[in-house]
Amino acid sequence: MSVIYIKGGIVVDPTQGIDGEIMDIFVKDGKIVEESGAGKADTVIDAKGMTVVAGGIDIHAHIAGPKINAGRAMRPEDMKYARNKSGPLRCAMGRVLMTCPAIGYEYARMGYTTAIEPATPALYAIHTHEELDSIPMVDKAVLPLFGNWHLTFKFAAEGDIEKMKAFIAWAIERSKGFGVKVVNPGGVEAWKYGRNVHSLDERIPGFEATPAEVLSTLIKASIELNLPHKVHVHCNNLGVPGSAETTAETIKLAEKIGASKDGRESLHITHIQFNAYTGEKWRDMGSGAEELSKLVNRTPVTVDMGQPIFGHTTTMTADGPFEFALHKLFKSKWINKDVEIETGGGIVPITYRAKSPVNAVQWATGLEFGLLVDADKVVISTDYPNGGPFVEYPYIMTLLMSRKFREKEIEEKGVNSYIEKATSLPSLDVERTFYEIVKMTRSTPAKILGLENKGTLKVGADADITIYPFDCRNVSPEDYEVLLKGLRSVAYTIKDGEIVVKDGEIAKEVWGRTFWVNAVKGATQEIIEEDLNEVFRYYTVSRGNYGVREEWIRRPETIAIEE
Amino acid sequence: MTLIIKPKSEFEVCVEAEITPEIARNLEDAKNFKVYLGKEERRLEELFDLEFVDDREEKVILKGDFSRVKWIGREMKGGEIIVEGNVGMHLGAFMEGGRIVVKGNCDDWVGGMMKGGEIVVEGDTGNRVGCNYWGESEGMKGGRIVIKGNAGNYIGEKMVDGEIVVEGNAGDFVGSEMKGGKIVVRGKAGYTGWDMKGGVIEVGECELSPSFVKDAEGVWRGDVNVKGEGVVRILQD
Amino acid sequence: MIRDIVCTFCGNACDDIEFEGDYGRNLCPIGEAKFAKKERIKAPMVDGKEVSYEEAIERAAEILKEAKRPLLFGWSSTVNEAIRLGVLLAEKVGGIYDQCSSVCHAPTTLAMIEEGIVGGTLGQAKNRADVVVFWGCNPVEAHPRHPTRYSVMAKGFLTRSRAERRVVVVDVRKTPTAYLATDFYMVEPGSDFMVFTALRSIVNGHEEAVPEEVGGLTKNELKSLAEILLKARYGLIFFGLGVTHSRGHERNVEAVIKLVQDLNRKTRFILQPMRGHFNVVGSGEVAAWEAGFEYAIDFSRGYARFSPGEFTAVEALIRGDCDAAMIVASDPAAHFPKKAVESLKEIPVIQIDPHPNLTTKLADVVIPTAIVGIEAEGTIYRMDGVPLRVKKIRESDYPSDVEILEKILEKVIS
Amino acid sequence: MIEVVVITGRTTDQGMTIDEKLSEAYMKAVSFCEMNEKDMEKLGVKDGDRVLVKSELGEVVLYVRKPEMDLQPPEGLIFIPMGPYANRVVGALNGSGTPQYKGIKATVEKTDREVVPVQEILNF
């Protein structure tokens, strides 16, 4: 490992309250160090006139596992685009859906150094880790799915927090996962009966539990387990008019339970845009972002945007009934997978059209959240690939920073004027500062994930650094083109103390770590032994073959939770 | 000018040569035109003998065995290509204009996703004439393909507009998921008309998908499963 | 005793095998044969002469580097770790990556490209399905423990016994699987497309579009079959090579996918292809995440191109599109049509495999390896994509596929 | 001589011998065809006799096997286990990328020619 001096850059680091100060940053052995401890520089980067921030963190992108891979196989028309020819680096394929090498390279070229795969059936965790292991350049982690697992329903119905804790700890240890993901709790099970659940208080078919009980029990258990990242939820009723109400109710569950022991939020509502529509029918559908943003700002809840990007993409979610609805709506191709007695999922291609009133509202709603929720509570995301490609994050950042750019986009793309009636976006004059954007892409996701060495340039932090080729103090929302260009073309990305991108091109292929949380000491495992044995009678794999061993992962890093 | 192209020898593996009449404009450019012998990038003149005739045409004549040369006429926009013998896969794929005449037979994918122009094949063709490429939702969008011999399977699938005429027989899946345009098979065809949303198929005889209903005029309409407005006219009925 | 061993024969990938020395419990007859000791390729060979591993690897790398478009084929009987190296190797030598699917269930991939697929894990057969259809497949001989473990006699939490399942078999002849059936329908060979479409017309309420007889079934028989499907609470169609190997190929599969899509508007229904080899699914999945496509991938232009019918091994060989081949964990000389084997005989062939087979007879370089799942471990995907780890239960002097491929890749890159 | 449709497929014996392709056991498992007893009568062959199967793709000599009474293929259909013998007469290419291994038109006639040993099956 080498020593890098980053000299004279304009540093922005919200974790230290640094907003555009000219500073030197010293990197040694993959960490950020004091000048005194750095020693002789192997490389000196003259960052004069450039902006130095921590590496970006994607809190929610479907980058690995059976879903995206089935999507790839289903969409050769999307995969045929070549991003990089084979040479010293790998060939990298894909337009919106991408191959593993392409995903790693594109994150790095955008200055991102960590990405979280947010939904894998624990049954398929081996597969998901294989794919994560094939993604170069970034650190990563995976969230196993809990919201439709029969054991989750059982412990929720019994209100047994101790068993739920043991179960969570068992499942994330088995899947080498990072936290608790919940998708449409109860709804995916109901879909196996051809139905869905439509409210938080509806009984889940075949069980005594309700979605509200599932969520509350999981949130409480996650708090008690001290998981670094608490419950990460894709709410019920996603994607339909009226979903804003369900989201509000979900947030209130967390409000009732309260914050985590360390004061951080206890619930992360993911891709909130997709769950924030008012109205009763598509015809009177509107944005619930204003109300929901206020609610988020005063409750122990964080969100990510789930911003749609106009154009083609592929939706993929564990929310099986939602994907069936999309298939019926668009008569498009449709993958469905019902997974044992733990979850399910679906995949449907989609095109977001600026001229469509519904898509226009979705676009505006995502941006409203990005503008209205506290920068300490909202993270930029497209819910890749559901909203669109993650490579458009610089575009989203620019939209959030420049009202003029928003107006230009509305005008040029011909965004349906229904947004004037149904959303507050056209009248919002909020313009995010660069400091806030750094929060929303670095320090806020790091805080939500509980990754203390990420999203920061503090001494001791991982040396994951983005250097933008512009002076953030001089960019004005008026010059959005300059801003967009600057955000798109990273001067340097440093990963674990190595220069991996220079002038927007990959300089070196590296392999990041896979974080996983070991919380088994936080709960008495024996209390669920019988339940596990009982439930495995209905699995088609043996309990002994269920899960992932650490030695099968390329670079595992355990985050151990003490008792 | 007219450019006459002949293979120098038998190729070790198939050659990919996206030759269009445009390359007949300039001798030097034609000589240096990039073609591919497997993973090796070659210049056209390394693999082929080139002969120029200084006339007023924009024309390419292919002499000798081109049955293992692929992508002739890809995205061609005008002018003429005459193939004197047989020709390999993907002839005239994505073609937009001009004319290709093949005196011999063609391999698969003649006029794949063609948008305009004309292809005339005097012999037989392989499968997927005027078809959509993998995963694409639309096939042929315009132009005309005439096959004097027989055609293989998957002819004109997902066709949006344009015309395919097969003078001989065709195989299975004529006009599957067709949306518009016209396909004529004068001889026999296999499975025909499945999931047709629009357009017209005229066929000597065929095995019609069991999802069509005969109207009062004796014309089959369907596909009922997609509420389609396709028309299949069986000429020997 | 070693427990939870995964059997490495068919796509069932039964993971409840127990070994006490050489004695394995819970194996079917084919599984027993799989684990039995048998003749091996003794040593690496080049042009029929025994050589060291280093020499064989050197020669293999040379052939691959010199070739204008080498074919790298096989993969379904090895582990994902080896398959990944295979895809990388194909990329680096500008060759074709193709795998056994192209001669078995690739039509299912093509149909999925058109329509997606409504699927589920085998647990849905075990726990939920009350109507189970076997169409053009014969699990009693090809996936022997399928009926007992998953689909017919299994005890699930909703469907608790054989009596609670209606089992339908559709085939062109009476197979041993037909003995398990509540209802058996015999159809004419090559008529699957027509029968699926006729059923779909009936399910959608368009009986009038269905002639009096389709594919050997009367309209009344078709209606009765449609009725069985519609009455299912949760139905499941398993389909096999009878569907993919017959006239119609991927459109047969597409037709049944569309039928199942429409059935889901009335009840719940899923589909599951009866994939053959224990890791044929992995050989598609790994290629998809590394290169974007499951099979028929050409890298000659430095990026991946997908073209079934062109870069599938059989067609590529017959068209003379490849001037060398590397065969890993497969036997195309036995399983390809004659014309493709003729072409294979004309070009240099490298074989990597534990056992001598027909491909060995025409291979120029033969590199014997450890048997996956017995002498070497790794990840494999069951027919429904469920990942499992196959284990090393016996010591062996043979290097693994992974070790050999790593060395070849190293030589090719350097 | 009769006209038939050939199908191929897996069998238990073929599966059990698949890793021993050069053995007699494998040859025994894959070098026969099953047919309806009425077709056998028409050809004048009995179990264990040899027939020549010819299709557009080639020809092969196989042993005749009469299956259990109940499991006979219908008249006009013959079954050959998948493998190198079957592949002399099946595997038509239809443009899907997957050969047609089932439903191939062929003729069957009685023959005195020997079944080629598996070791020599590639000598064509």
Image (spheres, grey):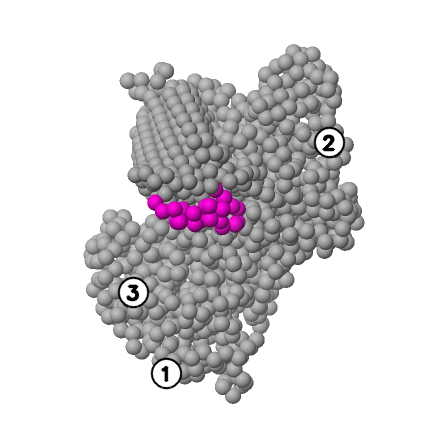
Q: Position of residue C342 (x, y in %)?
A: 63, 34
Instruction: Give the crowd class for mark 2: few <14, some 14-19, many >=20 residues within 10 Å.
Output: few
- In the picture provided, is A412 more to the left or to the right than A65? left
- Does the rendering let one see residue A434? yes
Q: Which amino acid, by three-letter code, is at mark 2? A: Glu
Mark nearer the N terminus (1 vs 3): 1
Is A124 drawn above or below residue A451 in the view shown? above
Q: Nearer the viewer, mark 3 or mark 2?
A: 2
Range of residues picked out in magenta? B25-48
Q: Are marks 1 and 3 on the same chain?
A: yes
**Residue beneath disc 3:** A399
Write down the chain letter for disc 3: A
Write down the chain letter for disc 1: A
Q: Which amino acid, by three-letter code, is at mark 1? A: Glu
User: Dots 1 and 3: beta carbons under 8 Å?
Assistant: no
**Residue beneath disc 1:** A21
Q: Nearer the viewer, mark 1 or mark 2?
A: 2
**Residue beneath disc 2:** D120
- In the picture provided, is B126 more to the left or to the right than C274? left
Is C287 drawn above or below residue C132 in the view shown? below
